[in-house]
Amino acid sequence: MRPDVWISERTPEGPREALRGLASLHDFPVEPGTGRLGHGDLLVAGHDVDAAVDAIPHIDGLRFVQTFSAGVDALVGRLPAGITLCDASGVHDVSVAEWVILAILASNRGLPALVDAQRASHWQPDHDRGDDLDGARILILGYGSIGRALEERLTPFGATCIRVARRQREGVHAMAELPTLLPEADILVVLLPLTPETHGLVGAEVLGRLRPGALLVNASRGAVVDTPALVAALSAGGLRAALDVTDPEPLPDGHPLWSAPGVLITPHVAGDVRREEDRAWQLVVEQVDRLARGEALRNIVTAGY
């Protein structure tokens, strides 16, 4: 079988060349259009998610949509019935896991204050002492492929990981156990997908169970964390935070999170590395090859994740 695959008209030549031997390629427009586009087996949403959603109803017989992101909240509920959504689980494991470690080390060792001192041309040897990771207890909330990659990288530092996920399995705690596990954690890393069940999950009750001085790291979706509750906890001085995602996002100028004590914020860049695109397109090539061979596709999204 030679499947019909739809890609954004902005797709570069390299991925096109890799796919031509496996499929018939068609471009969907990045601007809304009307009229039938033709037959399709798989559509690659890529970074043009809204354009893809606009194009999907105009493609006949479409069976699969492939994203470039591990989180699929931007597409869940927006696809016609009968279309299977596949996420990009695995593509961002290395980059996001490395960002989490970067954020932990920067926060624990007071790097933002030292950078500020450098910008002021001020030698500041008397900064607050920080914490190393040897013996640290890190609770990973949302233990999927990124969580596994993170644990692999944290273990050589001497840290111990506590695994929690919505799907309980051997070695991974159930969400119901979270309240009793939180007080044990020095660091809480949030890697949950955004669903109706996880929206605002990390609120005042969860934050209040963390020990004084604990660090919250969010590399998932901003709305998993209750922003007013987080601002209150930071302002009270009992919590620190490192955030790659916020709610709202982008975070507007003057928002209280910007000036909250003990917070490090980056603008949703945890997955942004030079090899990100290559990994995403390699997944697409593997998926199209499976489709051409009549094999089951990977990373099928069920129940919103």
Image (cartoon, grey):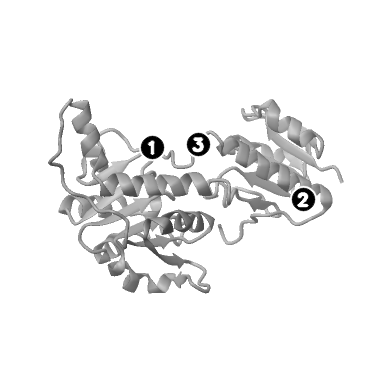
Label 1: element kind: loop
Residue 259, image x and y in percent? Answer: 21, 40
Q: Amino acid at mark 3?
A: Val
The residue indicated by pointer 3 is 273
Q: Nearer the viewer, residue 88 or 112?
A: 112
Q: Quadrant of the C terminus?
A: bottom right
- State whether residue 56 appears in this view: yes
Pointers 2 and 1 in contact (C-beta within 8 Å):
no
The percent coordinates of residue 196 (x first, y second) are: 46, 59
**Secondary structure at numbered mark 3:** loop
Residue designated by label 2 = 290
Q: Earlier in the sequence, mark 2 or mark 1?
A: 1
Q: Residues within 10 Å of mark 3 (few under 14, many from 20)?
A: few
Q: Position of residue 281 (x, y in %)?
A: 65, 39
Q: Residue at x 26, y 55 (%)?
A: 229
Q: Give the left or right position of residue 105, taking residue 28 as reference.
A: left
Q: Which mark is residue 267?
A: 1
Is label 1 or label 3 in front? Answer: 3
Query: Secondary structure under badge 2?
Result: helix
Write the residue at 67% across / 37% down.
55
Q: State the residue in front, 26 or 138.
A: 138
Q: Is residue 26 left or right of residue 129?
A: right
Residue 280 as seen in the image, left or right of residue 202: right
Up-down relation of residue 230 to residue 9 (above or below) = below
Residue 27 seen in the current view: no
